[in-house]
Amino acid sequence: MRYPREHSELTRTKILKEAASAIRAKGPEGVGVAALMKQAGLTHGGFYAHFASKDDLVAQAIGVMFEEARDRFDRTLAGADPRAALSNYVAFYLSPGHRDARTRGCPVAALSGDMARLEPEARTRFAQGISTLAGWLAEALERHGVAHSQAAGRSMLAELVGALLLSRTVADPAESDAILADSAAAIRTRYQLESAQ
């Protein structure tokens, strides 16, 4: 039975969203095609109607993760002045909720340790995603009046990701929360975002 093109696209999107969540939670190596398709409510055999290989799926799922990050970023910036938008983004990114939401959180924090073992296409998409995310921050920083906004965007991204990763490695919840709070306060002070909270 042939399905309409819309059905095929919806199915592919469903698989990619399931894959993005599973890859964030288990890493690319921890995700099996059969289990993923079962989780999506589909048969294993249908996988190859949508993807050439597991490597193809991983690369495309990384693209979806960064699209989701862009949607979150856009929602945070929507209608807000640049300073308030940046402050809101820092509050979201360095929150206990984001720290604990590994299946929905930032792809940079979720996958940085896996990149060396992935195929070139996945690494390329990941690098493009990092560059794009740093660029979004740079645009907001430039609108806020920060000099050298490109460098500042890369620096802010590095601090956000580093603080989130470090907070996930600490066993003591109070210490983990303190890492997030201290880093958020330092970023707000550096970029004069305090009064925007």
Image (tube, rainbow, N blue to C red):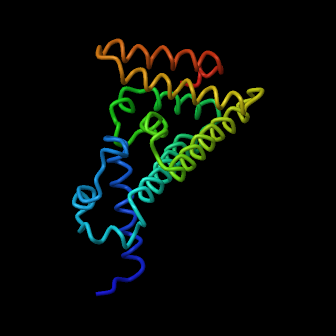
Q: Is residue 151 left or right of residue 11?
A: right
Residue sitting at 34 percent across and 83 percent down? 3
Query: Where does residue 151 sit, x and y in percent of width and height?
Result: 71, 29
Residue 66 vertical placement versus 179 (above, below): below
In the foreground, 116 or 134: 116
| Relative horizontal placement of residue 79, taking residue 144 as reference (left or right) | left
Q: Between residue 95 and residue 119, name the one nearer to us.
A: 119
State the residue at coordinates (36%, 70%).
Answer: 48
- Residue closest to the far right: 147
Where residue 25 appears, as percent x and y from the top left, is 32, 41
Residue at 72 percent across and 36 percent down: it is 143
Q: Which sits in the foreground, 137 or 169?
A: 169
Residue 180 spot, x, y in % from top left: 44, 20
Q: Would residue 103 appear left or right of 117 to someone viewing this image?
A: left
> In which quadrant of the rendered view does residue 42 lie?
bottom left
The part of the image, by quadrant, that contains residue 179 is: top left
Disc tally is 0
Q: Indicate left or right for 182 with 10 as reference.
A: right
Against 138, residue 38 (above or below) is below
Q: Position of residue 173 (x, y in %)?
A: 30, 16
Q: For the view shown, which residue lies furthest in the bottom direction? A: 1
**Residue 13 versus residue 44: which sits nearer the camera?**
44
Quadrant assignment for the N terminus: bottom left
